[in-house]
Image (spheres, coloured by chain):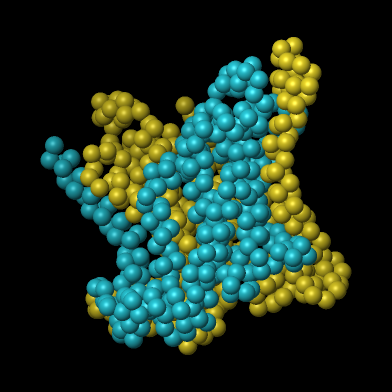
Chain colours: A yellow, B cyan
Amino acid sequence: MAVPKVKASGSTGGRRKIRSRQVWPYMFILPFFVIYIAFNCYPLIYTFFISLNEWDGFTEPVMTGLSNYKNIFTEDPYFLKSIGNTLLFMAFDIPIVILGGLLLASAFNNRKLKGANFFRTAAFLPYITIPVAIGVLFSLLFDWNSGTINELLARAGLISKHINFLGTPSLARMIVILMICWKYIGYHMIFFNAGISGISMELYEAADVDGASGFTKFTRITIPLLKPIIEYLVIMNIIWGFQLFDEPKVLFSSWTSSTGASSLVGGPLKSCMTAIWYIYDTSFGSQMRYGKGAAAAYGTFMFILVFSLAAFIVMKILGRKDRDGR
Amino acid sequence: MKTQKVKNIIIFVIMVLVALICLLPFYFMIIMSTQYTEDIYKGITFLPGSYLIENLKTVFNAHFEMYYKNSIIVAVSATALSLFVSTLCGFSFAMYEFKGARFLFAFVLVTMMIPTQLGLVAFVVEMKSIGWMNTLLPLIVPPAATGFGVYWMKNFIGSNFPKELMESARIDGAGEPRILFSIAVPCIKPAIASLGLMNFVTNWNSFLVPLIVLNKSDTYTVPIGIINLNSAYRNDLAAKITALSIGIIPLLILFMLTAKTFISGITMGAVKE
């Protein structure tokens, strides 16, 4: 595999041509690698060195060894809390969007259904909306005083007093989960839709002949055949899950407040602080501790590695079981 | 036969409900942008008010169009650059076998797993030292190298552009860059369109990096403009919501016009198997 194929066809062209044919592949990949190394690899490595220092970005950095790591893991309770929050959000979001998307997609697979196209576009809109706007929209909907949801519940007589959705830790977390599900469910549906339309109708017809129920068809045909897509989406969700920042940050930015009150970092009692939010807040927000923020980035990185690896292994094992079972 | 009909009706009802849930927040937003702030605080209404023009005036007095201009510059140039980089790199991995190709492609895949935000602290230090703070460059150049774009282009080119076409072009004496730009690119136009749309949306929506690197209001992009509306209009909630609507509606329209390309593009990579 390692031997370039171009060498074999060398007899047809001149020596110079072969040379250029060996050089061009590298020329073509060069821009990607130059940009990636300059603006991603280099900062990633440099971040590690910053994490070993106490630095505010302006004065001279002071080498402090691993004390920033000690700080985030043993002294500052909010780093681990932010990781915990991030994982909690994922634990709810991922099953909901995947199962929900799958169910919606199989329900609407009927091609004769009127308006299905319009519906798909509508369900997809939240995904492409500016995340900042999603945060604002949800803060408008769930506002304590003037929120639409509070108004609706009050008018329907379900509540006597407005609920402080965004000021109560457990409710605030629920809103964040709701917001993420609202954003991603249409996206997942579209994926599964494309997958299901690729499954041959004959399989379902054969199952009908055997008298299989809708549920059996779903678990025995649809899910196994969509497994590559499910795996892809689980991995993507883990990647996105750790990157969660925009929507919760804006949700608690007190955008709707008429008094211009300062925003609530991390939500009530930091119950909605995500990993990236913690990094941002430590380095550029309420503190200017570059070193600590950098250490938090590496701490987060460690968790990402562990969880991606775990997900990968679990899916491999499930995959093997499946093959043996057949 | 009858049960089938009942089933269809149930499915239709669910469909309408889900569509409503997805669309209602947008509807409320548009309705609020046509109202007077005091009326919004009084409680919800489902019908548009008559205050839209006033709200629009307030918004444009605060130069919201400047954020728009910046966002368009960022999204268009970042998308163009990213398409160029991804096409070149994807083409190379799909069409050539060269030393180190496997390793380098594995590297590209690994980059997809590492969130760029992790290097944020050093990235900002880097931007400061090369003088890119308060410019749009950090939003244009670094996002051009995405592992996803390369992976996606490699997959598409590999399965849609026949290698034989390359051989015959070579026999005709075409050089490698010419093969890429005048033979391969026309063949992969749909892929370029889809990836371009996806990139456009990502770059338009970008928030974390601009939040840190843009500190002057004349460099704000739309998302940063939106969250800073608070300081611009303070008490005028209706004006803020109007600005929010203006900030997102064009993108929604763009999406509706191109929904097919967009959706097929997003699913193309994963559904292939």
Which residue is found at the position 46% from the left and 79% from the top? Answer: B61
Q: Residue furthest front?
A: B173
Image coordinates of residue A244 in percent, x first then y, are 55, 61
Image coordinates of residue B109 in percent, x first then y, are 64, 41
Q: Quadrant of residue A26?
A: top right
Left or right, A250 with respect to A202, comes to: right
Image coordinates of residue A258 in percent, x first then y, are 44, 85
Left or right, A67 with respect to A190, comes to: right
Viewer-closest of B15 and B74: B74
- Measured along the vertical axis of the image, is residue A198 above or below residue B84? above
Which residue is found at the position 78% from the left and 65% from the top? Answer: B129
Visible in this render: residue A279?
no
Viewer-closest of B81 and A223: B81
Which residue is found at the position 48% from the left and 69% from the top? Answer: B65
Q: Quadrant of residue A245?
A: bottom right
Q: Quadrant of residue B54?
A: bottom left
Viewer-closest of A129 and B166: B166
- Measured along the vertical axis of the image, is residue A263 above or below residue B143? below
Q: Residue furthest bottom?
A: A259
Visible in this render: residue B193?
yes
- Measured along the vertical axis of the image, is residue A75 above or below residue B108? below
Image coordinates of residue B130 in percent, x first then y, are 76, 62
Which residue is found at the position 58% from the left and 53% from the top? Answer: B77
Viewer-closest of A179 and A326: A179
Left or right, B205 with respect to B93, comes to: left
- Locate the N terminus of chain B by quadrant: top left
Left or right, A214 with respect to A260, comes to: left
